[in-house]
Image: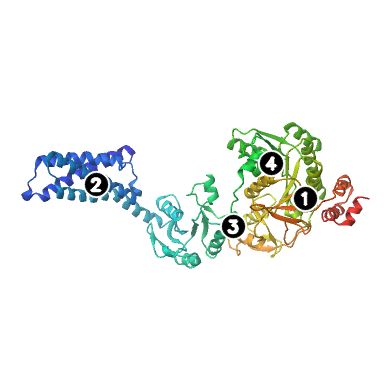
Amino acid sequence: MSYRKRIIYLFLLDSLIVLTSIYFSYYLLLPSGRVITYPLILSSITLLVGHHLFAYIYKLYKRAWEYASVGELLAIFKAISFSIILAAFVQQAALGEMYTRTLVITWMMHILLIGGSRFSWRIVRDQYLKRSMKKKKRTLIIGAGAAGTMVARQLQQNQEVELVPVGFIDDDPAKQNLEILGLPVLGGVKSIKSIALEQNISNIVIAIPSLDRQGINRIFSQCTRTKAKTKILPLIEDLMLGKVAVNEIRDVQVEDLLGREPVELDIHNIKSYTMDQTVLVTGAGGSIGSEICRQVSGFAPSKLVLLGHGENSIYSIEMELRRTYPDLSIETEIADIQDRTKMFSIMKKHKPYVVFHAAAHKHVPLMERNPEEAVKNNILGTRNVAEAASISRVNTFVMISTDKAVNPTSVMGSTKRMAEMIVQYMNTISRTRFVAVRFGNVLGSRGSVIPLFKQQIQNGGPVTVTHPDMIRYFMTIPEASRLVLQAGALAEGGEVFVLDMGEPVRILDLARNLVKLSGYTEEEIPIVFSGMRPGEKMFEELLGQDEVHEEQVFEKIYRGKTPPVDVSCVFKLLQVYGELEKEELRRTLLDIANFRQEAQDRMLV
């Protein structure tokens, strides 16, 4: 039915109900069926006009009555009551008396007939939905609060959604055994397994947007004991940022289980060194570099320079930023940080105020097999960018480092440690403030184990874990990037900032969660142990024994003061690394990065 036809239909129906009700009331109350013509005509006209007037005011003709609830019932009550009151005043003014009993009966008939006519649409629709819901997937909603109620209502009203709610789970004792929107609160979180089995549940929706990560883990661990697929509402952070709507249900992701609560940044300090300034990001097409670009763009720099070696990735982030920030001045530089001349040329051309150095080779096994490439990119490349920044009088230089640089056992970790040494050295001879920011694994980054696990699951398994007891620190890409920006604002020069990575995670638990989140069991996608690879450690550290762990300088940011370093052996290595065999180069890198005296003596001969 079209909107116009709907209004005409309701207008005529209400007119018939009003006239019938007033006539019936007069006929019922007057003896011998006599009807006083003038009062009846006056009351009929007044009620008819009054009803349509208040129906317009309370929008009775614009409401979707198939979704009628308490709010619609209250609107009907107000419109009818005020029209009756209006009729009473008109009777008193024109006739000198009010026909109270007649008006009371008329009021009751209006409520019954108009309310019934409206809610019959809801009844018909609900009956239709009940028949269609038999074909849908039975769904349990975790959380009987405002968000859970909203989800239940959306699922009940949306015929296109394949989920049908059958009940709530909530730990609040006051809600136990109650019904909300006709759905029972079946029990608490600990009873999810038994309830899911009893109710034949195929889907579970976690509907608590403000839930912290520990809470999500607690609930998800109970959900994994069922055969149901678990979904979740968006996180409160995403809701506040306007990235998603509250009714967007999605699958639970590993980031929900391993990430931490968002950090409130010191916006003023970050703006003070980025707003209206030229910012240059190396490795801008990478997972960390591109996210730094997104975060920096929100602080209104005068110009953002995207520097990277891969043209496709640089093009991708450039197009994204131009769509999101159409007024931002963006320039791109396709260049290799190993090209010293090009680095100096780019710095001279743009004269950035801040440089975020995110370009690096990060894959541990690949760098073990290609140590010379790790040296060229991670050490030589860092030196080129740092010295170019110093000559161009950059104010702040922030290098992205890794926990693998602490007591390194791999080529990648060793080269990153030496890059840190160069940055510390540059701070002693330059007017530029040089700092490094050190953190662990980043969820979803190209060097993370998660993309590998997902690919293995997609291929039907098995998922390969190197060792059952191996643990790692994890952080989300946006969180790491925001903290890098904050560390830059805190920089005084020479620091190695360490990000609080929270509790370490067993890689085996991570693999099991990914299998479950992908909708499989360990029988369908087995997990096998492949053994530790060259350069790997059982666990990573964020600070070495000889590094001083000072006070916390910001939420989740610590300042690690490292001891003075002698970089002469690093510079010597950069002169001769091409002459060394792969294994000899690998041993030399590990010796220098771990400050072994014999290696330094050998390099300085």
Q: Please report contact status of discs 1 and 4: CB closer than 8 Å, yes or no.
A: no
Q: Please report contact status of discs 3 and 4: CB closer than 8 Å, yes or no.
A: no
Q: Which mark is residue 284?
A: 4
Q: Where is residue 165, by image quadrant?
A: bottom left
Q: Is residue 148 something one can see in this rendering?
A: yes
Secondary structure at numbered mark 4: loop
Residue that badge 2 annotates: 81
Front position among marks 1 and 4: 1
Q: Where is residue 532, by image quadrant?
A: bottom right
Place of residue 579 in the rendered image (x, y in percent of width and height, measured from the top left): 89, 47
Q: Which circle's residue, 1 or 4, is located before the other in the chain?
A: 4
Image quadrant for the N terminus? top left
Q: Which mark is residue 257?
A: 3
Q: Which circle's residue, 2 or 4, is located before the other in the chain?
A: 2
Tell me the kind of residue under disc 1: Lys
Front position among marks 2 and 3: 2
Tell me the kind of residue under disc 2: Ser
Q: Residues within 10 Å of mark 4 (few under 14, many from 20)?
A: many
